[in-house]
């Protein structure tokens, strides 16, 4: 004896349009969560790349250079595209899909802020100081 | 009884077994006399028995005895040496104690020749010899080192041929005759070696017996051999304190050599010197392998026997003295310093060598300039040698002892002595004893004031890291405690650090241009030191500067320390350039952000494609007629047919459906939500849209805000001009163009035209109500009613 409780809107008699809408909602939610995860992970990665590194870049600090450049690359390649997807799904929430909760978006904005602050305020500034010294012949 | 006989036989066998020549005594420090001894008493006791005419026909003993005196003459240059030359045989022929110096040397050598050349005594009585020696030393004034140089050519012997009517001996009540001579001779071991005998009594007077035997000891009686070997330092013979030495020569020709070798007191003997191919080679390593470390050695004395003895030209040092002390014996003297050397002497058959050395002198220093009662204290002891301060491995060969502190392990430069708590006294006296070699030691003593209120200024804590750009000067703020006042100086203000590229960067530290800063007594304060680089570079390391602090009351009491400055210096970066680069990066990032946000707004506000949704439109004309009830009735005058349904023209930015235009509006401000502007190109637009009833109804000027998805319908809109609106207010019916937009799939199998007409009819009915409210409002505005 089947004891399953029937769920309204499901079952073999469900209209195709409704099925497609459910799929769209599911894929949109996955995209949104993926974007938030990308933002958070990139923020953590950029912070880790800044961890325990000297303030001033000097000749010979190849690994430090690589870390700062990698941080900027992550910003452009991961953080900003992640924010694009995040933004798209959030703006689209006024349509047929509603965002699931406030927290993922807070994580997304906070991650974006951390990532950009570190990318510019630490990695970018280190590279800027080095470039300025090299430009003026101090190195 | 039989067992006793066996034991006695074994003891006798032990006494008569000959000792090989290599077993002859060879003390490292002859006579036990230290180089530090300041007074010597030497008694030359020379055999005068008649047998010498047979055993030493060439009088080599005279040359040997003179060599002995000559050796002591060298010693007399730095110490007081008293010499007495005595002979013995039947009796003891006493001499006088004479101070040995250059003036008396000739006379003493004359006494030696006079005494040693005598060989007229018929007996050889050891008891009389040692009795006289004991009395001679008893008559002396005492000395640090007392030596009995005893030469004999035979055993204790009372010759029956010379006894005559009887020989009076003080140790025998009756005269000695041929009948009782054996009894008399048997008394000798007990008188000398027995308890309280002459051997012990000489030992109690601090006398070391240097015994020289001419002849084969194996042929001697066991009693005589016991006396000579026992007093000569061999404890196995149980005779005397064992502080002497014994050597024997089987050939009289070797006497000068052996006697000279035995007479070198105050020197350290070098062992195992074996000539190779008639050449003797001695180096600084040979000397260092001896009892004394080479850096403490001041001279070398070699006594060699052979033919044509002469230092080789290949030697790196020159002999300062070369003295012939026998027919075939030469004494060579060589001074040394701390430098390596090689001495090669040719023509050598056998040799003995000795080194003169000076004890290392301990020098005591306090680690801290100020000491307080009850506090622990540390001291450093260094060793000063004759050629300078001792450092390195040689330190480990020295032994330092102190009764007042714990001596630590030497670290290559000296020893540290720790005192757990200073006594409650105004002064603390530290005494140490430094032993350089056996018998070669020196004590040191130093007194330090305790509780003296002389506190030099001190740096309270290490400064914070110094960061900056360029070459400085960079200020370094030091928290100092002046305490009792004084000065803090930089001992070496010029240091170096290594840059990131391995380059050396010179650093100069200063207190306002000076190496020192003077501080008045008082509380802690901040003193600014400056650090200046001689070139630009990356310096990320600790700069250590040696400092010296001295109290004002006693500038000589300096306390050294190390000031560690953590540097984080980089070349100067042009601030405007850094700002420009950073701004460029920020603009790039913010531009990318804006582009993304703007692009997303355009994306989400794009007009849907009507082809994918089968959206069609149709134009119609609606009549708006006021009713008698103050409302408007909106009806279709020209209903669209199925053939009128057309596909709208669409781009992502706008959609044209006849007169209806839906345009995407995206603000440049990313946070403003995009929308779609919907209108018919008329002054007023009234629209009803959205699936289901009642949907959204609106009346707006020219356009109204909608969403891009409104382009999918259903949407019914009509347009009115301002004059038409005024006509409606005046109650005049008007005709207005309209557009119907919907997804034909919504017809669900029915006639799309008819479905559209029904849709339009329903929507116009709702729009009539909406427009009625608008017309009423305009009417009331015109009439001023409320």
Image (spheres, helix red, strand yellow):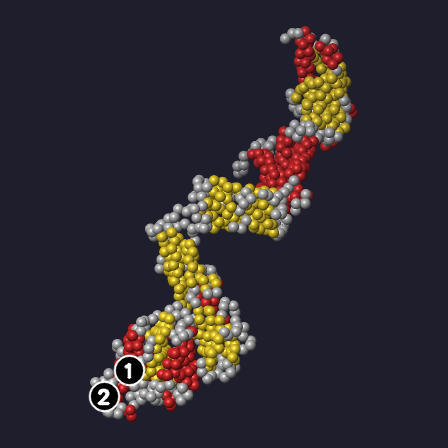
Identify which residue is drawn at 72% across, 26% down: B663
Label 2 CA crowd tier, 10 Å (few <14, some 14–19, many 20+): some
Residue located farthest toward the left when viewing the structure as drawn = B173
Evaluate whether residue A45 shows in this view.
Answer: no
Element carrying mark 2:
loop
How many marks overall?
2
Q: Which quarter of the figure has residue B698?
A: top right
The numbered dot on residue B367 is none
B562 or B118: nearer the viewer = B118
A12 relative to B220 in the view: left or right: right
Residue B130 horizontal/vertical position (percent): 30, 80
Q: Is residue B385 above or below residue B149?
A: above
Which residue sits at x=39%, y=50%? B371
Q: Which residue shows up at 29% across the image and 73% down it? A: B204
3D distance between C-alphas at marks 1 and 2: 15 Å
The image shows residue B264 at horizontal and vertical percentages of: 41, 75
User: Tag on residue B127?
Assistant: 1
Q: For the residues tagged 1 and 2, is the chain the same?
A: yes
Foreground: B687 or B274?
Answer: B274
> From what the image shows, is residue A135 above or below residue B7?
above
Q: Is residue B348 visible?
A: yes
Residue situated in front as seen by the camera: B626 or B460: B460
Q: Point out the tag, 1 or 2, that comes first from the N-terminus.
A: 1
Q: Which residue is mark 2?
A: B175
Residue that appears at 27% across and 78% down: B197
Residue B45 placement: quadrant: bottom left
């Amino acid at each position: 004896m089947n004891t399953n409780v029937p769920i309204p809107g499901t079952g073999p008699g469900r209209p195709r349009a409704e099925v497609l809408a459910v799929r769209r909602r599911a894929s949109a939610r996955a995209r949104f969560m993926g974007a938030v995860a990308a933002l958070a992970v990139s923020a953590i990665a950029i912070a880790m790349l800044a961890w325990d590194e000297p303030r001033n870049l000097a000749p010979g600090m190849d690994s430090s250079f690589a870390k700062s450049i990698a941080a900027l690359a992550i910003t452009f390649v991961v953080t900003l595209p992640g924010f694009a997807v995040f933004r798209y799904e959030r703006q689209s929430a006024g349509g047929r899909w509603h965002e699931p909760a406030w927290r993922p978006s807070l994580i997304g904005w906070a991650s974006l802020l951390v990532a950009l602050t570190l990318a510019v305020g630490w990695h970018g500034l280190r590279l800027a100081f080095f470039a300025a010294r090299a430009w003026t012949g101090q190195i | 009884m039989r067992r006793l006989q066996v034991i006695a036989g074994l003891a006798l066998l032990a006494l008569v077994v000959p000792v090989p020549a290599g077993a002859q005594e060879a003390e490292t420090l002859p006579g036990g006399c230290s180089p530090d001894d300041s007074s010597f008493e030497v008694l030359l006791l020379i055999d005068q028995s008649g047998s010498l005419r047979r055993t030493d026909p060439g009088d080599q003993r005279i040359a040997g005895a003179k060599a002995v005196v000559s050796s002591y003459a060298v010693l007399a240059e730095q110490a007081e040496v008293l010499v007495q030359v005595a002979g013995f045989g039947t009796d003891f022929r006493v001499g006088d104690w004479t101070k040995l110096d250059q003036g008396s040397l000739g006379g003493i050598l004359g006494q030696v020749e006079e005494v040693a050349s005598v060989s007229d005594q018929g007996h050889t009585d050891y008891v009389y010899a040692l009795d006289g020696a004991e009395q001679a030393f008893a008559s002396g004034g005492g000395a640090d080192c007392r030596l009995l140089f005893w030469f004999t050519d035979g055993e204790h012997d009372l010759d029956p041929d010379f006894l005559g009517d009887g020989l009076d001996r003080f140790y025998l009540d009756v005269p000695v005759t041929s009948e009782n001579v054996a009894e008399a001779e048997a008394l000798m071991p007990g008188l000398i070696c027995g308890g309280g005998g002459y051997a012990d009594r000489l030992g109690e007077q601090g006398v070391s017996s240097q015994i020289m035997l001419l002849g084969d000891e194996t042929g001697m009686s066991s009693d005589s051999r016991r006396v000579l070997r026992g007093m000569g330092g061999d404890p196995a013979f149980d005779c005397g304190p064992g502080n002497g030495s014994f050597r024997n020569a089987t050939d009289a020709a070797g006497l000068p050599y052996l006697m000279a070798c035995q007479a070198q007191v105050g020197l350290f003997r070098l062992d195992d010197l074996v000539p190779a191919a008639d050449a003797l080679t001695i180096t600084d390593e040979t000397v260092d392998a001896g009892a004394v470390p080479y850096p403490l050695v001041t001279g070398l004395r070699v006594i060699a026997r052979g033919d044509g003895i002469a230092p080789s030209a290949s030697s790196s040092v020159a002999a300062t003295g070369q003295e012939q002390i026998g027919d075939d014996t030469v004494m060579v003297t060589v001074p040394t310093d701390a430098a390596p050397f090689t001495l090669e002497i040719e023509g050598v058959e056998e040799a003995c060598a000795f080194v003169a050395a000076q004890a290392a002198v301990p020098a005591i220093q306090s680690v801290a300039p100020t000491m307080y009662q009850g506090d622990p204290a540390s001291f450093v002891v260094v060793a000063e040698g004759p050629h300078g301060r001792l450092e390195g491995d040689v330190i480990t060969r020295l032994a330092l002892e102190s009764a007042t502190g714990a001596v630590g392990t030497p670290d290559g430069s000296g020893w540290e002595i720790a005192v757990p708590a200073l006594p409650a006294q105004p002064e603390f006296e530290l005494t140490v004893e430094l032993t350089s070699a056996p018998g070669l030691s020196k004590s040191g003593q130093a007194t330090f004031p305790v509780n003296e209120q002389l506190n030099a200024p001190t740096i309270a804590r290490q400064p914070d890291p110094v960061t900056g750009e360029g070459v400085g000067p960079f200020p370094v703020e030091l928290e100092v405690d002046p305490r009792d006042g004084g000065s803090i100086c930089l001992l070496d203000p010029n240091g170096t650090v290594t840059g990131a590229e391995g380059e050396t960067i010179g650093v100069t530290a200063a207190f306002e241009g000076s190496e020192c800063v003077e501080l008045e007594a008082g509380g802690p304060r901040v003193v600014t030191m400056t650090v200046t680089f001689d070139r630009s570079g990356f310096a990320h390391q600790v700069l250590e500067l040696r400092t010296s602090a001295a109290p004002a009351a006693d500038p000589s009491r300096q306390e050294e320390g190390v000031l560690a400055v953590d540097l984080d210096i980089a070349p100067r970066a042009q601030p405007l350039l850094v700002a420009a680069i950073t701004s460029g990066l920020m603009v790039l990032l913010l531009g990318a952000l804006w582009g993304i946000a703007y692009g997303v707004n355009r994306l989400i506000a794009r007009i849907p494609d009507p082809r994918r949704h089968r959206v069609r439109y149709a134009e119609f004309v609606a009549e708006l007629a006021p009713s008698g009830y103050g409302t408007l009735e909106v009806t279709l005058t020209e209903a669209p047919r199925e053939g009128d349904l057309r596909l709208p023209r669409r781009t992502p930015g706008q959609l044209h459906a006849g007169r209806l235009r839906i345009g995407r509006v995206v603000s440049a401000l990313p946070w403003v939500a995009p929308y779609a502007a919907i209108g018919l190109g008329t002054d007023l637009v009234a629209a009803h849209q959205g699936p289901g009833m009642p949907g959204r109804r609106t009346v707006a000027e020219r356009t109204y805000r909608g969403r891009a998805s409104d382009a999918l319908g259903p949407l019914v809109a009509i347009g009115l001009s301002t004059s038409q609106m005024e006509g409606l207010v005046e109650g005049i019916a008007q005709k207005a163009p309209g557009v119907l937009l919907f997804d034909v799939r919504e017809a669900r199998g029915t006639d799309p035209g008819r479905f559209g007409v029904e849709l339009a009819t329903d929507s116009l009915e709702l729009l009539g109500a909406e427009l009625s409210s608008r017309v009423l409002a305009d009417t009331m505005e015109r009439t001023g009613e409320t």
